[in-house]
Image (cartoon, rainbow, N blue to C red):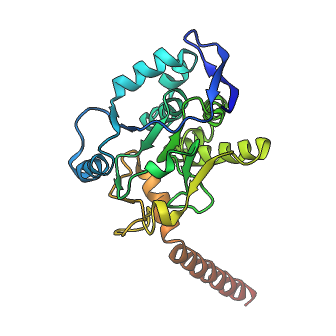
Amino acid sequence: MDIAKISSCSQDGNLKYRVYDKARMIPPIFHQTWKSSEIPEEWQVAYDSCQKVMSSYTRRLWTDSEMESFVKRNFPDMYDLYMSYPHHIQRCDSFRYMLMYHTGGIYLDLDTVCRQSVEALRSFDVVFAKSPNVNKYVTNSLLMSVPGHPFFKYVIEKLKENKDKYSLFGKHFHVMNSTGPVFFTRVYDAYTKQYGPIPNSYMLSKEEFSGDCSVCADTCTGGKMFTHVTGRSWNSWDSKVLNALMCHWKLVLTLLIILTVSLYVVYKRKTRLRMY
């Protein structure tokens, strides 16, 4: 049996070493989060689809109060940070990283429809997925891991130093860079740069995970294993503006060029008039 030692969080909040059995499979536990046990109507189809595709798995819907209790009980040294986040989505993000490290299993956002079982992926130690929106990013909307994997310990450790990242630039930039996909991608890149490729890991391609679904798509057919329904429950006005700019960047660039040329023409005309 291949055994490796990694750090874990003890009940008193101090880091200690525990035994991590790399031969174990990812637990068949399916985790999702929402503020209450009432699933929003627009996500019920997605929720039911995963229940149908993975009916033999243990299903766990974590509510806000249950997430808080989990963090307080299992990660007491992270509790103050967890409660200090100004945005609810930051607590949801950080919770999923702690959940993967402590319990393991499969985490999936509520707005994701399951098309195929992930059973074949359970033989990996960790599974990630490419972002539906930016090719170079790794999404945090799907996570799979054995308990105690050192990568998620590394992610948890990086939460504290990124708490205020871009906090002065509005909710969207703060969330994305402190706990969200930009943070997660940056930590993933730093970890693999320091320790090399993660052994026995798998990265779902865009074709496998999201297909043609993205924040820019009004409708989509999705990927081989998953597809998406309308989500973005945490988005505020700045997210909507930034997403619109990203999705219509060609139009924005064209308008900027036209505006620049127009201002230049006006400036030149005024310069000529002054000469006479």
Is residue 35 visible in the rendered structure shown here?
Answer: yes
Q: Nearer the viewer, residue 187 or 4?
A: 4
> Looking at the rendering, in which quadrant would you find the N terminus?
top right
Please give the name of the residue rendered at 52% of the width and 38% of the height, measured from the top-left corner.
25
Q: Residue furthest top?
A: 12
User: How far across and down, in percent of the image, does residue 167 sit?
Assistant: 58, 38
User: How far across and down, in percent of the image, does residue 60 sit?
Assistant: 34, 33
Please give the name of the residue rendered at 47% of the width and 16% of the height, measured from the top-left corner.
72
Q: Residue furthest front?
A: 1
Q: Nearer the viewer, residue 158 or 263?
A: 158
Q: Nearer the viewer, residue 183 or 237?
A: 183
User: How far across and down, in percent of the image, does residue 237 sit?
Assistant: 41, 51
Q: Please give left or right for residue 48 compared with residue 270 in the image.
A: left
Q: Please give left or right for residue 28 compared with residue 12 in the image.
A: left
Is residue 245 visible in the rendered structure shown here?
Answer: no
Q: Nearer the viewer, residue 3 or 125?
A: 3
Please give the name of the residue rendered at 27% of the width and 50% of the height, measured from the top-left corner.
52
User: How far across and down, in percent of the image, does residue 70 sit?
Assistant: 43, 21
Q: Residue furthest right?
A: 194
